[in-house]
């Protein structure tokens, strides 16, 4: 695939999405879409490590929360410019990712053990943030409303949509670039068979460390966006299990280890979550019931997610007579 | 546990003191004993987890949610039928065995295509599903049940022990012994051990591996029903209640060695005491950190646990 052809779909999708705020005027809809984009960024982060690297983190909240808290606290406590604090939040999140990755991967933790330790780290962060004085403790942090673009606050929600979309676009390009790079090939090799990859001269520790650092940085960006959009944080939001779950379920629903999987998954998840909220009334937890069921169904029946399923249907439609083009059993082995 | 909370209240007053708090030997002894009593229930929860791990080699992330479900079942039986939590064991233990059996046989097994990473995701999905279904039905309120013996206690001269916790300790020990006997002495136990050691070989000599997997999962879930009945007289339940226990159970399982039954028992008692003492000295929210710190430290430095042989 030539360079242009590889990035053309991304440009097309982003351009199409950028039109949305010009057409849609409903604040509720834009609100929903902005939240979906924020989740999509967190999911893109998870997908770099989980989808391409095969390391399933159950605690991406640790990175989301760090990005969010650093963004908010440097603003409220030190008075720094939010554009700068979002960047610092990303760096801080990436650093936390590198440290957690170094500790876990050096000890050879994989599979369930890696999932457990990431979950434990996220919980420790949550308890500490809830108890510490600087984070505002259980009362949380409130960012002062001061609507100026240089202050990362916009009069129109549509503008924030474009900012979120820009970050999603960066995530898409980054994922595609990794996919096409030597590092990406090494990462996939580690996912498929770590020992074989090592025998071929790949250093699995280095590859996984770079992956978790990039993954954490991207998810921290999502946290920074969250803080800037909602202007409020507490430990349960920043380090809560909800974002770990959404960051993991979205890529699996959308298509794990693919460029568009996390975005598609986030749209599907949030869409269905809202739909059930509408149909069932505002029953607490009902959308998460749907997420849990979707996760099980996706693993059972669509291991390559919505994008994979769409691709399968597309191929079947184009060549209806050739049964060899329906690879249903291969997806399950991969993850 | 009126006495324990009094001790904790005393602990909080001491927190403002920069010098490490000093407690009388009686208070410390009571904390240790209470820790052992709680630890026995932790051990029971961990036993279910470690049994499933030892045989199926999977971490059951739905363990905590299933415990919460069992606790709500105890609550519902008490509110609707007036059934005493201890009597509730009679219907609930077989019921949860069946639930566990069916989950493994018809959901987790088929959905995960025999792939470890998929099992992890399916049990995570189950835990999200169950926990939030309970949240949707019962809302997030914290509930307790009233039993006449909740505040009865046994006076040991130097310490007062709450009666329900002493009963919980006794029953946990009996259940652990029964489980051990089942694994060691019965044909089912032999089949379970055979599958745990070498599932291909077990299948070759005619053992139905899928059935044994499901029985094991059922036993693990039945342990949760027992734990729920023992907990409810003194503990509260909310849709997130099981989560608090399951992390403790994970810690115990990695501490005792994944798949090791004696490890789960000793680990459970140990963690119970650690939690009780750190609650006494540091207050409750930081006491929680202690559990996670132990958990992370063991995973990083000794992932085989103190009693486990497997990596």
Image (tube, rainbow, N blue to C red):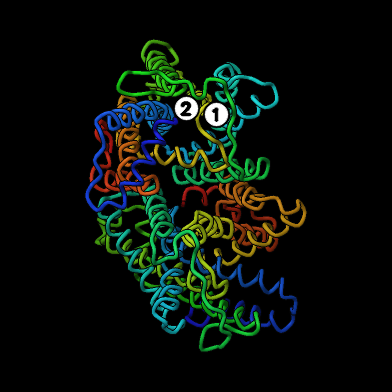
* Vertical order, B24 against A9 (above or below): above
The image position of residue A48, as x and y in percent, is 44, 64
Look at the numbered disc 2 and give the secondary structure of its residue: helix
Query: Which residue reaches farthest right?
Result: A279
* Residue assigned mark 1: B100
Q: Residue at x 60, y 19 (%)?
A: B84
Above or below — where is A329 with respect to B37?
A: below
Can residue A137 be seen from the camera position used here? Answer: yes
Q: CA distance from mark 2 to mark 1?
A: 8 Å
**Residue A270: mark in rendering:** none
- Image spot of residue A57 (x, y percent): 42, 54
Q: Which of the 4 image quarters holds residue A157?
A: bottom right
Give the left or right position of residue B80, taking residue B303 as reference: right
Between B55 and B246, the one nearer to me in the picture? B246
Residue B132 falls left or right of residue B158: right
CB-based contact (under 8 Å), mark 2 and mark 1: yes
Whether residue B209 is visible: no
Q: Which residue is mark 2?
A: B220
Choose between A250 and A129: the one closer to the eye.
A129
Q: Earlier in the sequence, mark 2 or mark 1?
A: 1
On the image, the x and y values in percent for residue A6 come to 51, 77
Looking at the picture, tell me which residue is in the foreground, A147 or B9: B9
In the structure shown, which secondary structural element does the residue marked by tag 1 occupy?
helix
Vertical arrangement, residue A321 with respect to residue A142, above or below: above
Mark 1, residues whose alpha carbon is within 10 Å: few (<14), some, or many (≥20)? many
């Amino acid at each position: 695939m030539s360079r242009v052809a590889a990035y053309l779909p991304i440009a097309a999708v982003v351009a199409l999405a950028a039109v949305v705020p010009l057409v849609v005027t409903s604040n509720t809809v834009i609100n929903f879409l902005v939240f979906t984009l924020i989740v999509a960024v967190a999911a893109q982060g998870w997908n770099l490590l989980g989808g391409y690297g095969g390391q399933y983190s159950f605690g991406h909240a640790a990175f989301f929360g760090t990005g969010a808290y650093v963004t908010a606290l440097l603003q409220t406590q030190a008075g720094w410019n939010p554009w700068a604090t979002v960047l610092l939040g990303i760096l801080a999140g990436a650093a936390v990712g590198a440290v957690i990755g170094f500790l876990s991967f050096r000890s050879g933790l994989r599979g369930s053990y890696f999932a457990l330790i990431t979950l434990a780290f996220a919980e420790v962060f949550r308890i500490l943030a809830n108890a510490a004085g600087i984070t505002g403790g259980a009362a949380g942090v409130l960012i002062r409303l001061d609507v100026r673009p240089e202050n990362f606050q916009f009069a129109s929600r549509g503008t924030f949509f474009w900012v979120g979309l820009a970050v999603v676009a960066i995530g898409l390009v980054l994922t595609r670039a990794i996919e096409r790079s030597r590092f990406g090939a090494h990462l996939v090799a580690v996912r498929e068979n770590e020992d074989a990859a090592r025998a071929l001269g790949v250093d699995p520790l280095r590859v996984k460390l770079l992956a978790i650092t990039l993954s954490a940085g991207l998810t921290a960006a999502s946290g920074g966006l969250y803080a800037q959009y909602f202007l409020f944080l507490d430990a349960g939001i920043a380090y809560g299990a909800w974002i770990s779950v959404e960051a993991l379920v979205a890529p699996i629903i959308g298509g794990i280890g693919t460029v568009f999987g996390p975005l598609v998954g986030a749209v599907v998840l949030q869409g269905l979550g809202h739909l059930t909220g509408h149909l069932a009334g505002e029953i607490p937890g009902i959308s998460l019931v749907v997420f849990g069921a979707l996760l099980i169904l996706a693993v059972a029946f669509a291991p390559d997610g919505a994008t994979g399923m769409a691709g399968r249907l597309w191929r079947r439609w184009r060549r209806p007579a050739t049964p060899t083009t329906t690879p249903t059993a291969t997806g399950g082995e991969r993850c | 546990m009126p006495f324990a909370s009094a001790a904790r209240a005393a602990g909080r007053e001491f927190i403002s003191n920069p010098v490490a708090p000093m407690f009388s030997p009686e208070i410390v002894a009571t904390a240790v004993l209470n820790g052992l009593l709680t630890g026995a229930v932790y051990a029971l929860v961990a036993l279910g987890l470690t049994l499933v791990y030892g045989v199926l080699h999977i971490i059951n992330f739905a363990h905590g949610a299933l415990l919460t479900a069992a606790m709500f079942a105890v609550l519902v039986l008490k509110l609707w039928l007036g059934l005493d939590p201890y009597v509730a064991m009679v219907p609930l233990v077989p019921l949860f065995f069946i639930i566990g059996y069916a989950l493994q046989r018809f959901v987790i097994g088929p959905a995960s295509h025999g792939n470890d990473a998929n099992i992890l995701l399916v049990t995570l999905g189950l835990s999200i599903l169950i926990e939030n279904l309970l949240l949707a039905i019962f809302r997030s309120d914290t509930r307790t049940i009233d039993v006449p013996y909740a505040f009865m206690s046994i006076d040991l001269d130097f310490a007062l022990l709450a009666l329900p916790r002493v009963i919980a300790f006794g029953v946990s020990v009996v259940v652990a012994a029964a489980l051990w006997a089942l694994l060691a002495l019965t044909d089912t136990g032999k089949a379970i051990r055979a599958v745990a050691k070498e599932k291909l070989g077990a299948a070759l000599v005619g053992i139905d591996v899928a059935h044994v997997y499901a029985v094991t999962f059922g036993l693990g879930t039945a342990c949760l029903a027992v734990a729920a009945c023992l907990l409810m007289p003194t503990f509260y339940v909310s849709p997130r209640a099981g989560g608090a226990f399951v992390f403790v159970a994970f810690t115990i399982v990695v501490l005792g060695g994944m798949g090791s039954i004696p490890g789960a028992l000793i680990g459970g008692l140990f963690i119970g005491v650690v939690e009780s003492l750190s609650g006494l000295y540091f207050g409750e929210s930081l006491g929680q950190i202690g559990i996670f710190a132990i958990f992370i430290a063991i995973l990083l430095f000794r992932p085989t646990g103190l009693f486990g042989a497997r990596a």
